[in-house]
């Protein structure tokens, strides 16, 4: 079977809206935002899909968050965590930094993988959710609810990876 892309669905809580993936967002599979009053940072979530070689590891992506933190003003990378989202195990690492215009931002980065049966290569599912600092406690929990609304149906010829040891 020729491997197919996964089907993605995002059940949004009240107050969030789907956004067309056009312009700067054209590479995204799903994009959602919470409308905010003028002048406030808009909490958002983006899901992207890409294919990576069978040698790729989730550790590379998690270390990439740490490298990004080192490049950003007052950047800090959080602890690695894992949880199931929509039937796929995702590994995550949060990032916080100070943006010149938006102030302090917190970015949730999650990486899930499907193995292509035909060649062992991987389909990477990246979930990136960003909130501002003004209401970070409430927004972090709400962003978690949005992420929990993600449903992933593996495409034909792909199998979800279940733990970090399988992402090699």
Image (cartoon, rainbow, N blue to C red):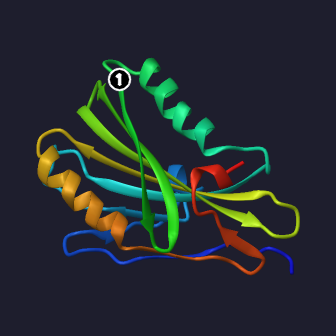
Does residue 87 appear left or right of residue 7 in this picture?
left
| Residue 7 visible in this rendered orientation of the protein | yes
Looking at the image, is 157 positioned above or below residue 69? below
Q: Judge by depth and name the residue closer to the eye, 165 or 61.
A: 165
| Residue 102 visible in this rendered orientation of the protein | no
Quarter of the view holding residue 33: bottom left
Could you tell me residue 12's position as x and y percent?
A: 31, 74
Does residue 3 appear left or right of residue 50 in this picture?
right
Looking at the image, is 95 positioned above or below residue 74? below
Quarter of the view holding residue 39: top left
Q: Residue at x 16, y 45 (%)?
A: 136
Quadrant holding the N terminus: bottom right
Looking at the image, is 68 positioned above or below residue 70? below
Tally of marks? 1
Q: Residue at x 38, y 57 (%)?
A: 45
Could you tell me residue 24's position as x and y percent?
A: 52, 49
Crowd band around label 1 with a 10 angstrom C-alpha radius: few (<14), some (14–19), many (20+)? many
Q: Judge by depth and name the residue closer to the eye, 112 or 98.
A: 112
Q: Residue at x 50, y 74 (%)?
A: 87
Could you tell me residue 159's position as x and y percent?
A: 69, 72
Which secondary structure lies at badge 1? loop
Does residue 17 appear left or right of residue 40 in this picture?
right
Could you tell me residue 107's position as x and y percent?
A: 35, 42
The residue at the far front in this view is: 165
Q: Judge by depth and name the residue closer to the eye, 37 or 86.
A: 86
The residue wearing badge 1 is 75
């Amino acid at each position: 079977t020729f491997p197919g892309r996964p089907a993605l669905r995002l059940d949004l809580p009240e107050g969030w809206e789907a956004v067309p993936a056009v312009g700067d967002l054209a590479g995204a599979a799903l994009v959602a935002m919470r409308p905010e009053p003028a002048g406030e940072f808009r909490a958002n979530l983006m899901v992207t899909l890409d294919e990576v070689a069978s040698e790729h590891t989730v550790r590379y992506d998690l270390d990439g968050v740490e490298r990004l933190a080192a490049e950003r003003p007052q950047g800090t990378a959080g602890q690695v965590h894992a949880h199931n989202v929509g039937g796929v195990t995702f590994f995550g690492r949060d990032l916080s930094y100070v943006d010149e215009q938006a102030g302090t931002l917190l970015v949730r980065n999650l990486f899930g993988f499907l193995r292509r049966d035909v060649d062992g290569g991987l389909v990477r599912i990246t979930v990136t959710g960003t909130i501002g600092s003004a209401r970070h406690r409430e927004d972090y929990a709400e962003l978690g609810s949005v992420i929990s609304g993600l449903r992933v149906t593996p495409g034909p010829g792909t199998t979800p990876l279940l733990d970090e040891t399988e992402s090699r």
